[in-house]
Image (cartoon, grey):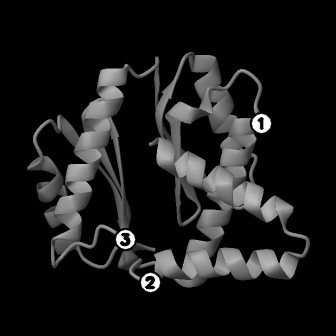
Amino acid sequence: MLSNLYVRTLLLLMFASLQTACVSAVVLGGATATTAALDERSVGRHYDDVSIATKIDARLIAEKDMPSRWVSTEVIEGVVILTGYLPTQSQIDRAEFICRSVEGVLNVDNRLEVGSPSAGSLFSDSWITTQVKTKFLNDKLVSGISLHIETVNGKVYLQGVLATDEQRYHAMELAKSVKGVTAVVDLMRLRSAR
Protein backbone atom coordinates (compact mmCIF):
# COMPACT_ATOMS: atom_id res chain seq x y z
CA MET A 1 0.00 0.00 0.00
CA LEU A 2 2.77 2.45 0.87
CA SER A 3 5.09 1.63 -2.00
CA ASN A 4 2.75 2.88 -4.77
CA LEU A 5 2.39 6.24 -3.07
CA TYR A 6 6.14 6.64 -2.58
CA VAL A 7 6.98 5.54 -6.13
CA ARG A 8 4.45 7.98 -7.59
CA THR A 9 5.75 10.75 -5.32
CA LEU A 10 9.30 10.06 -6.46
CA LEU A 11 8.18 10.08 -10.09
CA LEU A 12 6.29 13.32 -9.52
CA LEU A 13 9.35 14.98 -7.99
CA MET A 14 11.51 13.68 -10.79
CA PHE A 15 9.12 15.06 -13.42
CA ALA A 16 8.92 18.41 -11.64
CA SER A 17 12.68 18.78 -11.89
CA LEU A 18 12.73 18.18 -15.63
CA GLN A 19 12.75 21.32 -17.74
CA THR A 20 10.89 20.24 -20.87
CA ALA A 21 7.59 18.51 -21.46
CA CYS A 22 9.21 16.35 -24.17
CA VAL A 23 11.65 14.76 -21.73
CA SER A 24 8.82 14.15 -19.24
CA ALA A 25 6.70 12.50 -21.89
CA VAL A 26 9.55 10.22 -22.94
CA VAL A 27 10.36 9.16 -19.35
CA LEU A 28 6.73 8.61 -18.30
CA GLY A 29 5.96 6.97 -21.64
CA GLY A 30 8.85 4.54 -21.20
CA ALA A 31 7.77 3.63 -17.67
CA THR A 32 4.19 3.19 -18.85
CA ALA A 33 5.18 1.03 -21.81
CA THR A 34 7.26 -1.21 -19.53
CA THR A 35 4.43 -1.89 -17.08
CA ALA A 36 1.80 -2.01 -19.84
CA ALA A 37 3.56 -4.79 -21.74
CA LEU A 38 1.57 -7.51 -19.96
CA ASP A 39 -1.53 -5.42 -19.28
CA GLU A 40 -4.73 -5.87 -21.29
CA ARG A 41 -5.16 -2.07 -21.55
CA SER A 42 -3.73 -0.22 -24.51
CA VAL A 43 -0.48 1.64 -23.87
CA GLY A 44 -2.35 4.94 -24.31
CA ARG A 45 -5.04 3.99 -21.77
CA HIS A 46 -2.39 2.72 -19.35
CA TYR A 47 -0.48 6.00 -19.73
CA ASP A 48 -3.67 7.99 -19.04
CA ASP A 49 -4.42 5.89 -15.93
CA VAL A 50 -0.90 6.31 -14.54
CA SER A 51 -1.07 10.05 -15.22
CA ILE A 52 -4.43 10.35 -13.39
CA ALA A 53 -3.15 8.32 -10.43
CA THR A 54 -0.03 10.50 -10.17
CA LYS A 55 -2.13 13.69 -10.15
CA ILE A 56 -4.42 12.27 -7.46
CA ASP A 57 -1.49 11.18 -5.29
CA ALA A 58 0.10 14.63 -5.60
CA ARG A 59 -3.15 16.32 -4.55
CA LEU A 60 -3.67 13.96 -1.61
CA ILE A 61 -0.10 14.55 -0.44
CA ALA A 62 -0.56 18.33 -0.72
CA GLU A 63 -3.82 18.24 1.25
CA LYS A 64 -3.43 19.64 4.76
CA ASP A 65 -4.36 17.21 7.56
CA MET A 66 -4.63 14.23 5.18
CA PRO A 67 -2.48 11.24 6.23
CA SER A 68 -2.39 9.95 2.65
CA ARG A 69 0.39 7.47 3.42
CA TRP A 70 -2.38 5.00 4.35
CA VAL A 71 -4.24 5.48 1.07
CA SER A 72 -3.62 3.43 -2.06
CA THR A 73 -4.80 4.81 -5.39
CA GLU A 74 -5.23 2.65 -8.45
CA VAL A 75 -6.77 3.86 -11.71
CA ILE A 76 -8.12 1.38 -14.24
CA GLU A 77 -9.72 2.72 -17.40
CA GLY A 78 -10.48 6.06 -15.74
CA VAL A 79 -12.05 4.50 -12.64
CA VAL A 80 -10.24 5.39 -9.41
CA ILE A 81 -10.12 2.71 -6.71
CA LEU A 82 -9.22 3.95 -3.24
CA THR A 83 -8.23 1.44 -0.55
CA GLY A 84 -6.69 1.85 2.88
CA TYR A 85 -7.46 4.06 5.84
CA LEU A 86 -8.15 7.63 6.84
CA PRO A 87 -8.89 8.72 10.43
CA THR A 88 -12.30 10.32 9.78
CA GLN A 89 -15.24 10.02 7.41
CA SER A 90 -14.84 13.68 6.45
CA GLN A 91 -11.27 12.93 5.28
CA ILE A 92 -12.56 9.97 3.28
CA ASP A 93 -15.20 12.21 1.69
CA ARG A 94 -12.53 14.84 0.94
CA ALA A 95 -10.26 12.24 -0.67
CA GLU A 96 -13.12 11.15 -2.93
CA PHE A 97 -13.88 14.78 -3.81
CA ILE A 98 -10.23 15.34 -4.74
CA CYS A 99 -10.30 12.27 -7.00
CA ARG A 100 -13.47 13.39 -8.76
CA SER A 101 -11.92 16.82 -9.44
CA VAL A 102 -9.07 15.36 -11.51
CA GLU A 103 -9.59 15.54 -15.26
CA GLY A 104 -10.10 12.13 -16.85
CA VAL A 105 -11.67 10.46 -13.81
CA LEU A 106 -14.84 8.67 -14.87
CA ASN A 107 -15.83 7.29 -11.47
CA VAL A 108 -14.50 6.64 -7.97
CA ASP A 109 -14.81 3.30 -6.17
CA ASN A 110 -14.13 4.39 -2.60
CA ARG A 111 -13.13 1.42 -0.40
CA LEU A 112 -11.43 3.53 2.28
CA GLU A 113 -12.06 2.59 5.90
CA VAL A 114 -12.26 4.91 8.90
CA GLY A 115 -9.35 4.34 11.27
CA SER A 116 -5.65 3.77 11.14
CA PRO A 117 -3.76 0.55 10.61
CA SER A 118 -1.85 -1.06 13.43
CA ALA A 119 1.78 -1.98 12.87
CA GLY A 120 0.78 -5.64 13.06
CA SER A 121 -1.92 -5.32 10.42
CA LEU A 122 0.42 -3.38 8.10
CA PHE A 123 2.99 -6.16 8.39
CA SER A 124 0.38 -8.90 7.96
CA ASP A 125 -1.22 -7.16 4.97
CA SER A 126 2.18 -6.65 3.32
CA TRP A 127 3.00 -10.31 3.88
CA ILE A 128 -0.32 -11.43 2.35
CA THR A 129 0.17 -9.13 -0.66
CA THR A 130 3.66 -10.54 -1.20
CA GLN A 131 2.36 -14.12 -1.02
CA VAL A 132 -0.45 -13.42 -3.50
CA LYS A 133 1.95 -11.67 -5.91
CA THR A 134 4.35 -14.61 -5.66
CA LYS A 135 1.55 -17.05 -6.54
CA PHE A 136 0.59 -14.89 -9.52
CA LEU A 137 4.15 -14.51 -10.77
CA ASN A 138 4.63 -18.27 -10.62
CA ASP A 139 1.36 -18.96 -12.46
CA LYS A 140 1.06 -19.53 -16.21
CA LEU A 141 -2.55 -18.35 -16.53
CA VAL A 142 -2.43 -15.16 -14.42
CA SER A 143 0.39 -12.66 -14.64
CA GLY A 144 1.12 -10.82 -11.40
CA ILE A 145 2.41 -7.89 -13.39
CA SER A 146 -0.95 -7.20 -15.04
CA LEU A 147 -2.86 -7.17 -11.74
CA HIS A 148 -2.62 -4.79 -8.83
CA ILE A 149 -2.99 -6.46 -5.44
CA GLU A 150 -3.87 -4.48 -2.32
CA THR A 151 -4.54 -5.95 1.13
CA VAL A 152 -6.40 -4.15 3.92
CA ASN A 153 -7.13 -6.05 7.16
CA GLY A 154 -6.64 -9.38 5.40
CA LYS A 155 -9.06 -8.43 2.62
CA VAL A 156 -7.35 -8.76 -0.78
CA TYR A 157 -8.43 -6.37 -3.54
CA LEU A 158 -7.66 -7.62 -7.05
CA GLN A 159 -7.57 -4.86 -9.66
CA GLY A 160 -6.67 -4.87 -13.33
CA VAL A 161 -7.83 -5.79 -16.81
CA LEU A 162 -7.82 -9.42 -17.90
CA ALA A 163 -8.64 -11.18 -21.16
CA THR A 164 -10.91 -13.99 -19.90
CA ASP A 165 -13.27 -15.06 -17.14
CA GLU A 166 -11.03 -18.09 -16.65
CA GLN A 167 -8.16 -15.78 -15.66
CA ARG A 168 -10.46 -13.82 -13.34
CA TYR A 169 -11.73 -16.87 -11.43
CA HIS A 170 -8.27 -18.43 -11.31
CA ALA A 171 -6.83 -15.21 -9.84
CA MET A 172 -9.53 -15.18 -7.16
CA GLU A 173 -8.86 -18.83 -6.26
CA LEU A 174 -5.11 -18.23 -6.04
CA ALA A 175 -5.65 -15.26 -3.73
CA LYS A 176 -8.11 -17.21 -1.53
CA SER A 177 -5.53 -19.97 -1.09
CA VAL A 178 -3.09 -17.67 0.74
CA LYS A 179 -3.03 -18.09 4.51
CA GLY A 180 -4.44 -15.07 6.34
CA VAL A 181 -6.73 -13.90 3.52
CA THR A 182 -10.15 -13.11 5.03
CA ALA A 183 -11.87 -12.11 1.76
CA VAL A 184 -11.12 -11.45 -1.89
CA VAL A 185 -12.70 -8.41 -3.53
CA ASP A 186 -12.97 -8.71 -7.31
CA LEU A 187 -12.38 -5.30 -8.89
CA MET A 188 -11.01 -6.82 -12.09
CA ARG A 189 -12.42 -6.01 -15.52
CA LEU A 190 -12.50 -8.02 -18.69
CA ARG A 191 -10.97 -6.56 -21.82
CA SER A 192 -14.10 -7.45 -23.81
CA ALA A 193 -16.36 -5.67 -21.25
CA ARG A 194 -14.95 -2.23 -22.12
Q: Position of residue 27 (x, y in %)?
A: 69, 77
Task: Tell me, yes or no, whether the two marked residues, 3 and 1, touch with CB atoms within 8 Å.
Answer: no
Residue 123, position as x, y percentages in the image: 31, 32
Taking the spot 56% from the left edge, 73% from the top edge, the residue there is 46
* Mark 1 neighbour class, 10 Å CA radius: few under 14, some 14 to 19, many 20 or more: few
The crowd level at tag 3 (other Cα within 10 Å; few <14, some 14-19, many 20+) is: many
What SS does tag 2 mark?
Answer: loop
The answer to whether residue 64 shows anywhere in this view is yes
Q: Is 56 drawn above or below residue 17 in the view shown?
A: above
Helix or strand or loop: what does disc 3 sit on?
A: loop
Name the residue tied to disc 3. 146
Q: Which residue is mark 2?
A: 37
Q: Residues within 10 Å of mark 2 (few under 14, many from 20)?
A: some
Number of the label disc, if any, that sits on residue 116: none
Amino acid carrying label 3: it is Ser
How much space separates mark 2 and mark 3, taking CA atoms? 8 Å
Could you say which quadrant of the image residue 137 lies in? bottom left
The residue under the point 37% across, 71% down is: 146
> Residue 148 is drawn in which quadrant?
bottom left
Viewer-side residue, 5 vs 71: 5
Compared to residue 64, the image places residue 164 above or below, namely: below
Say which residue label 1 marks.
62
Residue 81 in view of the camera: no
Q: Are marks 2 and 3 in contact (CB under 8 Å)?
A: no
| Residue 126 horizontal/vertical position (percent) | 32, 41
- Distance from the alpha carbon under mark 1 to that under mark 2: 32 Å
Give left or right: position of 172 versus 119.
left
Q: Residue at x 59, y 27 (%)?
A: 92
Mark 2 vs 3, N-terminal side: 2
Q: For the view shown, which residue lies furthest in the right direction?
A: 19
